[in-house]
Image (spheres, rainbow, N blue to C red):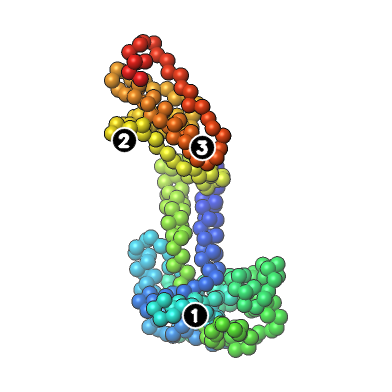
Amino acid sequence: MQSSEKLIQIVQSWLSYIRLEELTTAEVERGSNAYPKIIDKGVQLVGNKLMLDNSLFKQLCSQQAAVNRSNNKEFQIAVAFPQIYIVQGRAREQKIKYLPLFTIDISQIFRGRYRKTGWDLTEFEFQPVIVNLMRLYGLEEEVAESLIVAEGILKFLSDTWQRKFSTINDFIDQVDLPSGNYKTGRQPYLLRCDFVPYNAQLKQDLRDILKQLQDTPDDCKWLVDNHPATEYICNAPKPPEHEVMFWGAFTNHAPDSFQASALKHAQHNPITAVHGPPGTGKTELFLHLVAQQVVERALRIVRGEEDASNLTLFASTNNSAIQKF
């Protein structure tokens, strides 16, 4: 069995992976006016520094505070540049999707105070969006995946575009923008990285598991081998299968919960034992078992599979059960 310390590391790794996945989203819809996912007003670059309007900074700080109070999701904002986007559809169905080349995570600045002098983007973590670098600038996959990110954003920009940029602002002014169906602009923009819906519940489950492991490890009753949660975190889970309760024999005489439990067990096990006093439905259970065999045989015939025998042997220690059956 894995130790709780080891499990904490595993869960933290899962959460880190999800965070990177969200930061590397290939296409980001602009969103609605009420809740925009792309923010380009009040955002500027001067040299290597990100400059935000005070009103925009306060607005995002209040949103972060609200998210922290709700305690059900994470506030995550990144900056990207230049603006490259596509327009899909018309009229009300129209969608504007931005294609970030990389994302610089600036979420932490909204937990501090406003800076009139701005924030140096070379001090923040960033992640390249490999798919868009390949799509927009024709980078080979092996080349894109081998780009160095540990030495900072300026080194990354120089290596990727094979030219020297003294500042981030120089990159925006000098980089060649893609043509064709792409709309472009030489301005930075903010994008929300907390809007990915498909993994929201998974992320919250992992956070709950991590909190339990850190705060009350003795209450983790699921820390046993073969438990689904433990298998999911530490092993490969069992492949999914359809869950079938039972095939009833008579619509006006459906099995009760005990009979249904026995029927379900019989579908996956060669021997099923049932017991109980007279009148509890033991004999009636066999009618449903026979019905299951008939249905299974019909399905095999419909599918063109090999036919099977429905021969059933029913035995009892007394004649009354035989006659009832």
Q: Secondary structure at mark 2?
A: loop
In the image, 57 versus 162, the foreground residue is 162
Whole-percent x and y of residue 85? 52, 80
Judged by depth in the image, the label closer to the viewer, 1 or 2, is: 2
Determine crowd level at label 1: few under 14, some 14-19, many 20+ residues with C-alpha closer than 10 A.
some
> Which residue is disc 1 drawn over?
87
Mark 3: amino acid: Ile
In the image, 179 versus 202, the foreground residue is 179
Residue at x 44% of width, y 67% of height: 195
Determine crowd level at label 2: few under 14, some 14-19, many 20+ residues with C-alpha closer than 10 A.
few
Mark 1: amino acid: Val
Q: Find residue 301 and name its label.
A: 3
Res 30 → quadrant: bottom left
Residue at x 46% of width, y 48% of height: 213
Residue at x 38% of width, y 83% of height: 55
Whole-percent x and y of residue 202? 46, 55
Query: Does residue 48 sit above or below 25 in this rendering?
Result: below
Residue at x 38% of width, y 74% of height: 35
Mark 1 to mark 2: distance in Å?
Answer: 55 Å
> Which residue is disc 2 drawn over?
251
Judged by depth in the image, the label closer to the viewer, 2 or 3, is: 3
Whole-percent x and y of residue 39? 44, 80
Mark 2: amino acid: Thr
Mark 3 to mark 1: distance in Å?
Answer: 52 Å
Q: Secondary structure at mark 3?
A: helix
Query: Does residue 298 sit above or below 69 in this rendering?
Result: above
